[in-house]
Image (tube, rainbow, N blue to C red):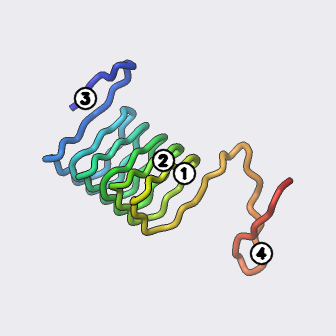
């Protein structure tokens, strides 16, 4: 169901009784209360507490409140206390409420235009380089 928000942007709601098997790609904002088995790419994602997403999430902003089994990549990410994430998380800005559960690795993304090349040691492992 697509709706018009007060700011004029369109958002879609996937209800708690809906199961989607397949990838979702949307230019609109998404609110998911149901179950999705597939990857999601959208501008903004809000996931309800009872929702389950099995697949990767890519969004400009994401507010995770349910279960996610898969990786998450978001510019602005909020992980609510009810969230249960099993997968790696890549973010620019991150907020995690006390009580949230994450099984995976966190990685802060650096904007491409300001990033320096990653130094690699002879053994192929990344090396930490500090700048003043």
Q: Quadrant of residue 2?
A: top left
Front position among marks 2 and 3: 2
Q: Earlier in the sequence, mark 4 or mark 1?
A: 1
Report the residue marked by disc 1.
91
> Measured from the top left, where is residue 45 in percent x and y?
38, 42
Residue farthest along the right direction in this orientation: 132
- Name the residue located 78 percent from the left edge and 78 percent from the top edge: 122
Which SS class for mark 4? loop
For the residues labelled 2 and 1, say whether their Cβ atoms are less than 8 Å apart. yes
Q: Residues within 10 Å of mark 4 (few under 14, many from 20)?
A: few
- Name the residue located 49 percent from the left edge and 40 percent from the top edge: 60
Report the residue marked by disc 2.
77
Which SS class for mark 1? strand
Q: Earlier in the sequence, mark 1 or mark 3?
A: 3
Report the residue marked by disc 4.
121
Q: CA distance from mark 2 to mark 1?
A: 6 Å
Q: Is residue 61 left or right of residue 14?
A: right
Rendered view: 42 above or below 83: above
Q: Earlier in the sequence, mark 2 or mark 3?
A: 3
Rendered view: 64 above or below 26: below
> Measured from the top left, where is residue 7 in percent x and y?
39, 19
Residue farthest along the front direction in this orientation: 98
Q: CA distance from mark 1 to mark 3?
A: 27 Å
Give 52 or 25, whichever is nearer the viewer.
Answer: 52
Please tell me how many numbered marks the rendered image carries: 4
Residue 31 disc label: none
């Amino acid at each position: 169901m697509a709706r018009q928000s007060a700011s004029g942007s369109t958002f879609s709601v996937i209800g708690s009784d809906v199961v989607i098997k397949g990838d979702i790609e949307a230019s609109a904002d998404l609110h998911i209360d149901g179950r999705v088995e597939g990857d999601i790419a959208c501008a903004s994602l809000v996931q309800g507490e009872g929702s389950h997403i099995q697949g990767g999430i890519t969004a400009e902003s994401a507010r995770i409140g349910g279960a996610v089994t898969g990786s998450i990549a978001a510019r602005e990410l909020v992980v609510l206390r009810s969230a249960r994430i099993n997968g790696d998380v890549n973010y620019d800005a991150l907020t995690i409420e006390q009580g949230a559960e994450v099984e995976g690795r966190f990685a802060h993304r650096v904007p491409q235009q300001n990033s320096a090349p990653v130094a690699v040691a002879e053994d192929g492992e990344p090396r930490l380089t500090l700048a003043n």
